[in-house]
Image: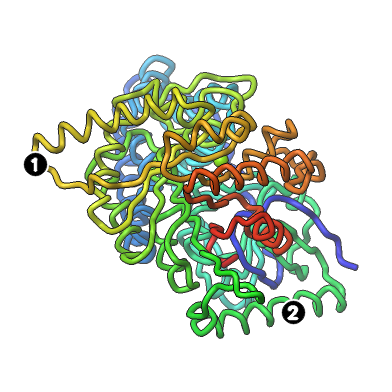
């Protein structure tokens, strides 16, 4: 048997190839003092390196936009903003002018300081942004030290599995998906920018493996299973056969998908189901349609925001929402308002460092505390309701008061839009996610104030069982089939039926065979899953 290493799935699919280890060691920058008359020259060198980095990032960004889309291209924004950040530039200048350090060392020190400052938070989203910082640091240092851009892959090696401590957005957009069969990293999360880009490029990826880089050997055969988050090092013939047959089944399935996608979703005993898609980025809506989704059950809008230094404006948000809605003109599209906090963290909000971010300032709590941020989204979403059956969904609701507060903000924005003659669909539906035991237990009351429910089992399981959904060590305890969870599912299903409102499930549970089977048995017949699971 090969060596099996388990991490977190970050991009779907199975890939097989030979390992190339890619290490992101920042170059060691020698200490170099300069004479006072050299200060101007070093300041100019710094400026030139920043200008060069900016040009390169803009070039990568343009290429990404052309190949993958506008939202994906925005992933480079934080790096462009860091280049303009006085914290970065002025801090470096000061070391040159006051400490008489060469530009390269001055910049290196400043970045070291910023990294220490950021790392202290230990917040997953901030740690993800450190990755952007490193990407930028490498680029500028290469300019200052006259190093070449590393040749990322030599195409004559055939299909490769890239194993790295972590990756960066710059690297991922330069990879050729024809060459890179899979990616495995020690660090990173599903919401790392590079992981989002791997998904857009259909490169299977597994993150959070811990020590894969140390254990992997260059040239060794490996398999990446991005469906369950596994890296197989040195697979034996039997492993290979298992994966080859799985992959062949997947390929066969993909080849048939157009025909299958058109089939009616109905159980053997004639019970109709409605299958919708979970979408993180607008580009995924098209995949979902090709895979036969009847609409979008969950559009995680926070992915338009995480890691950016500024809030996307109303027009930009509207375009993203409208694009998804236009992909499904004849089906419902449920836009979930920002679920920020927890493990999804935007740079522009001063998120507090919290002991328990998942029990902290998150989702609807953030939205109600930051009404200006929320109002911009409300207007953008309302404008998008003219593009078909666009519904609005509120995350992490605990009680009716929160629903009423959300509705009040919607009403105010509606009034302003009516006054300004901005069109929207006055009959739009507003629903809540059932993600906490509080909401599940109080579902009857919530049903009186909402148009639909969608159960987020990822959070419902974590909050019911007190098991952190991101903690790999507790994975065996994260059990959607625990009786306490099943009882809540059953009870919410009965409440929704009695109240005559639609109920769906959009947590990962719906994407597993047994989970879907159980949910249908509980008379929940609208399921929303990531497109590969459709
Ligand atoms: C859930 O909690 O099950 C859910 C679908 O929302 P998210 O995974 O985005 O928290
Ligand atoms: Mg959730």
Look at 42% across and 38% down and name the residue there.
Answer: 450
List x then y, in percent, for residue 455.
57, 45
Q: Which quadrant of the figure shows ligand 2?
A: top right
Q: Which mark is residue 259?
A: none
- Tell me how the rendering is colored: rainbow
User: Marks 1/2: CA distance?
Assistant: 58 Å
- In what quadrant of the picture does the N terminus appear? bottom right
What kind of element bears circle 2?
helix
| Image position of 396 (left or right of 485) | left
List x then y, in percent, for residue 93.
36, 23
Look at 66% across and 45% down and name the residue there.
Answer: 489
- In what quadrant of the picture does the C terminus appear? bottom right
Mark 2 near ligand 1 (CB under 8 Å)? Answer: no
- Residues 90 and 73: in front is 73
In this rendering, the answer to whether 505 lies above or below 465 is below
Look at 30% across and 47% down and name the residue there.
Answer: 428
Q: Which residue is label 2 attached to? A: 244
| Image position of 128 (left or right of 228) | left
- Residues 110 and 195: in front is 195
Q: Which residue is label 1 attached to? A: 421
């Amino acid at each position: 048997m090969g060596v099996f290493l388990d991490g977190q799935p970050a991009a779907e699919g199975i890939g097989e190839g030979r390992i190339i280890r890619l290490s992101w060691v920042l170059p060691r920058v020698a200490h170099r003092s300069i004479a006072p008359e050299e200060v101007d020259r070093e300041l100019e060198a710094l400026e030139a390196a920043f200008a060069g980095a900016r040009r390169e990032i803009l070039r990568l960004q343009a290429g990404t936009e052309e190949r993958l889309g506008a939202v994906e291209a925005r992933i480079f924004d934080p790096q462009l903003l860091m280049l303009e950040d006085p914290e970065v530039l002025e801090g470096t200048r000061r070391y040159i002018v006051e400490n008489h350090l060469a530009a390269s060392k001055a910049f290196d020190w400043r970045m070291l300081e910023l990294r220490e400052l950021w790392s202290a938070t230990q917040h997953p989203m901030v740690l993800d942004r450190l990755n952007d910082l490193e990407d930028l640091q490498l680029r500028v240092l290469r300019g200052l030290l006259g190093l070449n851009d590393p040749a990322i892959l030599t195409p004559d090696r055939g299909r490769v599995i890239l194993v790295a401590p972590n990756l960066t957005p710059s690297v991922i957009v330069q990879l050729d998906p024809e060459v890179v069969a899979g990616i495995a990293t020690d660090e990173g999360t599903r919401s790392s920018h590079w992981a989002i880009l791997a998904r857009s490029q259909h490169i299977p990826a597994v993150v959070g493996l811990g020590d894969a880089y140390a254990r992997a050997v260059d040239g060794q055969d490996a398999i990446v299973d991005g469906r369950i988050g596994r890296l197989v090092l040195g697979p034996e013939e039997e492993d290979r056969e298992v994966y080859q047959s799985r992959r062949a089944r997947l390929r066969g399935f993909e080849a048939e998908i157009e025909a299958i996608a058109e089939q009616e979703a109905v159980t053997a005993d004639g019970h109709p189901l409605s299958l919708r898609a979970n979408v993180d980025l607008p580009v995924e809506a098209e995949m979902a349609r090709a895979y036969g989704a009847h609409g979008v059950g969950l559009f995680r809008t926070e992915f338009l925001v995480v890691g950016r230094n500024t809030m996307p404006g109303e027009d930009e948000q509207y375009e993203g929402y409208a694009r998804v809605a236009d992909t499904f003109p004849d089906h419902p599209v449920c836009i979930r308002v920002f679920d920020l906090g927890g493990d999804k963290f935007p740079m522009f909000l001063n998120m507090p460092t919290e002991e328990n971010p998942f029990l902290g300032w998150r989702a609807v709590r953030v939205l109600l505390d930051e009404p200006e941020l929320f109002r911009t989204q409300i207007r953008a979403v309302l404008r998008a309701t003219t593009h078909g059956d666009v519904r609005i969904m509120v995350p992490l609701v605990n009680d009716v008061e929160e629903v009423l507060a959300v509705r009040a903000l919607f009403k105010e924005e509606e009034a302003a839009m009516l006054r300004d003659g901005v069109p929207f669909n006055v009959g739009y539906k507003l629903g809540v996610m059932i993600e906490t035991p509080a909401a599940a237990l109080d579902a009857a009351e919530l049903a009186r104030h909402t148009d639909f429910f969608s159960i987020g089992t990822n959070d419902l399981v974590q909050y019911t069982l007190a098991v952190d959904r991101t903690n790999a060590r507790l994975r065996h305890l994260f059990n959607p089939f625990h009786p306490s969870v099943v009882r809540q599912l059953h009870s919410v299903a009965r409440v929704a039926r009695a109240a005559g409102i639609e109920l769906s499930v959009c947590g990962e549970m719906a994407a597993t065979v047994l989970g879907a089977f159980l949910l249908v048995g509980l008379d929940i017949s609208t399921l929303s899953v990531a497109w590969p699971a459709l």
